[in-house]
Amino acid sequence: MTFSKNDTLNFSDFLLKAAGVSKAALDELISDAKKYGYTEILLPHFLVRQTAEKLRGSGANIKIATIIDFPYGLSSVEEKSAAARSAAAAGASIIEIAPNVMTVRDGDLKAFEAEFALITALVNKIKGAVVRAAVNELILTDAERDGLCHYLGQRKIPYRVISLNSIDSPAALYSFNEDLDQKIIRVNLKERSVRFETLESLFEKTDEKERAFLFGRALCSAVILREVTPGPLRGGAGSNKLVIAPAALASSGLSSSDIISVGAKSLRNSRLKVISRPSRAARSLARLGVLALIIEGAAEGFHYLLKISGGRVQLLSGENYLGLNVYEAAAKIKSAHGDGCSYLLQSPMAAFDSPIATASADDASGSPEIQFGGGFGLLMKTMGLNAVVIDAGEHDSFRDKAAAGDKAHEYHRQIEIFSEALNKNHTIKEHIKPYGTASMVAPLYEAGALPLAFFTKFESQGVAKISGAALKDAVTKRKGETGVSCSQNCAIKCKNIYNDEKNRRSAYIEYEHLAGFAAMNEIYDIDLTAKILRFCREKGLDFLELSYAMGEFIRSGAAKGKPAEIAAGCLAEIEKRTVTGNILLKGAFASAIAFGKASPMTQFPTKRCLPTIRARL
């Protein structure tokens, strides 16, 4: 396909407008790319050299991407190759090739594979330039797009799905405005649509008294049971729902009330999975008045960031967070959207299809220490959702509204009474506050319910090394912190911060970490437990699943050495993506099968491990 000079300029103007700018706003595009931390900007080929000159010496690490033979890809391979090399020489770091739409419709995808290989070989001779496919869903049917994406994925050809619908600004791909108070926000990522619903409209046939209790965990369960078909998932993530809901009293100021629940049908066993954790995200959603987010419609090949703010829901590009670990992604989000924003992040290990990939949320200090296991990270990846960002701004909290006027004094007095009652409770005062949840190690050991050596032993002399008192001594010795709160206004403050030998913090070592790793594998080493916990938080991995998986590997005898050394080596195997590392990333059940040691922990029909918080069955 050829264009006259006028046609080319008109088309390029259309392409720039589709990206959210005009020719005169190139400087604005670059400025926004810097502001929002974008790693690349997409431009017509004739603007590549001009843009490269503007970026040169600016200190901005922004890559220039351009599309060759867009949108139909009908040019010859010789013309595409020449254009690709010219763009790379002009300063483009990423060359996107539009597949020939006729070959896609005919199903002759091998022709494009050969074309892509030839162009890649030529472009790779220019330092710093890479090639990927551009899948234009504007001219393809859903079946054609899905078939092409599946083929490219099988052939390990990098690609990006491009949509030109309703884009009106360089920062926001799609923006929807609405009063969010007492609303349920339904986002369909595949259709790029947002609907605002009420509890009454969604559950109109539900008894009003029952409806009054639909918050947080209960609301997650109710939505999934109502809208997701029972039994095995059919259609993958496209038939699933991700539901996020704050607790009833989130942002109330009441101790331990800022709880957020995340629910879906499990990708592993097709059962209902809802996890509740303390997070600043709960407080932010509640301040906006949002009852829940329902995310549906898998957008394969996309990388979206969903932003919720006062009266607005936006779908932004999330591509600039790819390849970052959890802490790096959190820092980048706060840099782009403000320190006061809250977030829920997809695990970087979801990119490797790990079923133990987590979703990470922020704690009271804004650090991504709160994890949701059960494969929620992988679900976010399959849905095309990289992150959810909530910016409550200056919105009033539940507490501000409830304590307005004459009610303020009484409201605060009731909160103080509740906090005082918590602190007077014997168990909290004598055990939980000074030693945290690790105070459960000793009593559960005495009761015979501590998981020792994969539930094969009842006694061990090493348990004293991981008791609540031992953990407190270790934290103090490393100049860490005790009495830390993971949730704002929490009166209990049962958490801790452990500093390793490099003075890196490992936040919130708890009973399940000491029981799930140290006791389960008979490695009574708090420092190693903290190291693995830090690794899991950074990579976005379910600590318990990885601990059980490492235990299977240690018990198999496949590696020689002390158990602690083997466990530390497992982290290196995952980093290097070796065969062993890839098996560990699949979780405990896969590890039990692969490493050949049958375990009572993994012989249940659900193919899931027993949670260590429960007594022995």
Image (spheres, grey):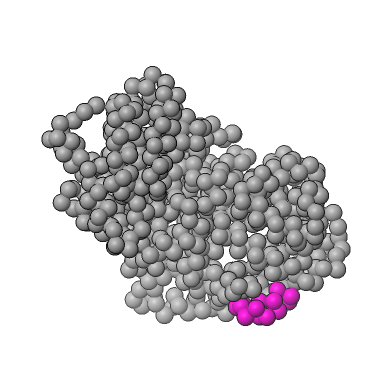
Q: Which of 48 and 270 is in front in this view?
A: 48
Q: Which residue lies furthest to the left in this view?
A: 6
Residue 423, quarter of picture: bottom right
Horizontal side, residue 175 vs residue 130: left or right? left
Magenta segment includes 472: yes
Q: What stretch is highlighted in magenta?
A: 469-482
Residue 592 lies left or right of residue 276; in this view the side is right
Q: Where is residue 85 in the image (x, y as percent from the top left)?
A: 32, 39
Q: Is residue 430 visible?
A: no
Write the residue at 46% across / 32% down. Answer: 152
Q: Where is residue 438 in the image (x, y as percent from the top left)?
A: 70, 69
User: Does residue 334 lie above or below 313 as drawn?
Assistant: below
Q: Which residue lies furthest to the top in this view?
A: 106
Residue 463, visible in the rendered structure: yes
State the residue at coordinates (46%, 59%).
329
Residue at 40% x, 28% y: name it. 115
Quadrant of the rendering where the N terminus is positioned: top left
Counting the numbered discs, the total is 0
Percent x, y of residue 490: 54, 73
- Is 533 covered by the magenta stretch? no
Between residue 313 and residue 537, name the one nearer to us.
537
